[in-house]
């Protein structure tokens, strides 16, 4: 009997079909954020601003579309499954000197060709930072109407581009709006900027698209650099706006108070929304964008998605950037950990655990949940990697180091 067969028998004793879990996971698509590869600089600006900071200067940052695509290819060779790439508007590929409010689908054709050749999908985000018209951390809520109009036009263009992605690739593209708007100190007026943001969003979402191709989401943040005291696009604002306008509310796991757990929000959101979007990162005190680890909160997030039978209802994307370590390694660690967490959730005997809870059999519930923690999860994960044709264990890291020596070190 092989190690995998022994492991499947141990899971079967708890009523879990490990083979079915692997087959289910193979169908899940996670959106890998392109901006980890170049520290969020993009191709239309030279400085990262808007309350965002990528610290470190590890060698080998991608400097152009060709290098970024090559790095994404290398990462994908080490990540199980076929997934999606999440783009920001600042990653347009064109020789034209064009501002963001004039972007068109043709400026992203290179990315569509890239994704199509690899049978991947694309998601999108308007880039409402690192721009002269966002220098004061006010954009869609700006008191100056001309600046608001610029960003409204950019967001409208972004929706057209995302719909183009969905139609070309036959896979729904998520277009997510996040803005840096807020105040460093206590504001004199909280409602006025939120009213302007609401009016801007109303204009952005006037155009209707086939939901088969485009899904729209809005993303909150509790605070950012330079907006420590007040954020216009708060969670309450966007949750209500999304509910009223039939949009997706995107939860970024690093955009809440340090004591808030996004895993606890998922079931409530899914009760009242057909779909939900996630940006998964790892907060460390004030910083929201560390590489995702296989920690307890990540496991709880994955378990909630599986428990709610919502794998087809949740857009799962990653959002972190660390310039202090090998950027390809950061992608691989984060993506593999997100998949590990989902597999962990799929290997849980959720129905029997729910039954124990409903019957108030808390003694057996605790004992069972603890016993599950030492089941041979690693063996099932290794089998999943083997079936996907990617390295098991730390073998993937050798490939990263070789690529670093052969490619990154020469940049």
Image: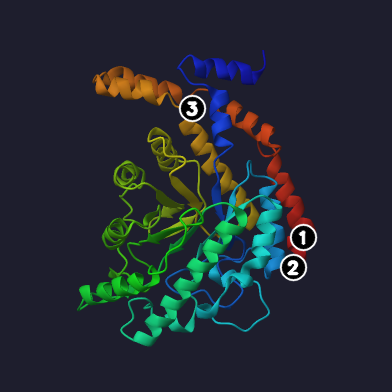
Mark 1, Cα crowd under 10 Å, few <14 / some 14-19 / many 20+, is some
Using residue 154 as the reference point, say whether residue 220 is left or right of it.
left
Q: Real-space Cα distance between discs 1 and 3?
A: 39 Å
- Which of labels 1 and 3 is toward the front? 3
Q: In the image, which disc is placed on residue 347?
A: 3
Q: Mark 1 points at which residue?
A: 407
Q: Residue furthest right?
A: 406
Q: Can residue 399 be seen in this view?
A: yes
Q: Real-space Cα distance between discs 3 and 2?
A: 43 Å
Residue lying at 46% horizontally and 17% vertically, measured from the top left: 15
Q: In the image, which disc is placed on residue 22?
A: none
- Expressed as whole percent of the image width and height from the top left, the position of residue 76 reads 67, 49
Which element type, helix, strand or loop, lies under badge 1?
loop
Q: In the image, which disc is placed on residue 411?
A: 2
Image mark count: 3
Label whose residue precedes the other's in the sequence (3 or 2): 3
């Amino acid at each position: 009997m092989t190690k995998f067969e022994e492991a499947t028998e141990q899971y079967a004793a708890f009523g879990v079909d490990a083979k079915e879990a692997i087959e289910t996971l193979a169908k899940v698509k996670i959106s890998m954020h392109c901006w980890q590869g170049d520290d969020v600089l993009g191709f239309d600006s030279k400085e990262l601003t808007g309350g965002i900071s990528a610290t470190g200067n590890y060698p080998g940052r991608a400097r152009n579309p060709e290098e970024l695509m090559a790095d994404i290819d290398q990462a994908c060779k080490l990540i199980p499954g076929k997934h999606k790439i999440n783009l920001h508007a600042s990653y347009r590929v064109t020789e034209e000197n064009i501002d963001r409010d004039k972007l068109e689908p043709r400026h992203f054709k290179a990315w569509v060709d890239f994704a199509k050749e690899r049978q991947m999908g694309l998601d999108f985000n308007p880039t409402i930072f690192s721009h002269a018209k966002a220098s004061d951390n006010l954009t869609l809520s700006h008191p100056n109407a001309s600046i608001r109009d610029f960003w409204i036009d950019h967001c409208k263009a972004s929706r057209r581009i995302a719909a183009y992605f969905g139609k070309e690739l036959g896979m729904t593209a998520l277009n997510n709006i996040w803005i840096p708007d807020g105040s460093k100190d206590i504001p004199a007026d909280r409602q006025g900027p939120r009213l302007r943001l609401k009016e801007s969003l109303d204009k952005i979402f006037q155009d209707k698209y086939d939901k088969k191709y485009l899904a729209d989401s809005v993303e909150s943040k509790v605070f950012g650099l330079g907006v420590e005291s007040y954020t216009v696009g708060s969670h309450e604002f966007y949750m209500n706006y999304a509910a009223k306008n039939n949009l997706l509310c995107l939860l970024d796991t690093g955009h809440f108070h340090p004591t808030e757990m996004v895993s606890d929000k998922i079931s409530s959101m899914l009760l009242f929304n057909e779909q939900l979007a996630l940006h998964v990162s790892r907060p460390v005190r004030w910083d929201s964008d560390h590489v995702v680890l296989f920690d307890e909160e990540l496991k709880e997030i994955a378990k909630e998605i599986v428990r709610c039978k919502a794998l087809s209802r949740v857009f799962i994307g990653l959002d972190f950037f660390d310039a202090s370590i090998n950027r390809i390694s950061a992608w691989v660690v984060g993506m593999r950990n997100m998949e590990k967490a989902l597999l962990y959730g799929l290997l849980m005997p959720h129905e029997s655990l729910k039954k124990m809870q409903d019957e108030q059999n808390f003694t057996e519930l605790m004992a069972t949940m603890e016993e599950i923690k030492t089941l041979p999860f690693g063996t099932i994960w290794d089998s999943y990697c083997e079936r996907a044709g990617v390295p098991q264990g730390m073998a993937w890291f050798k490939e990263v180091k070789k690529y670093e020596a052969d490619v990154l070190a020469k940049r």
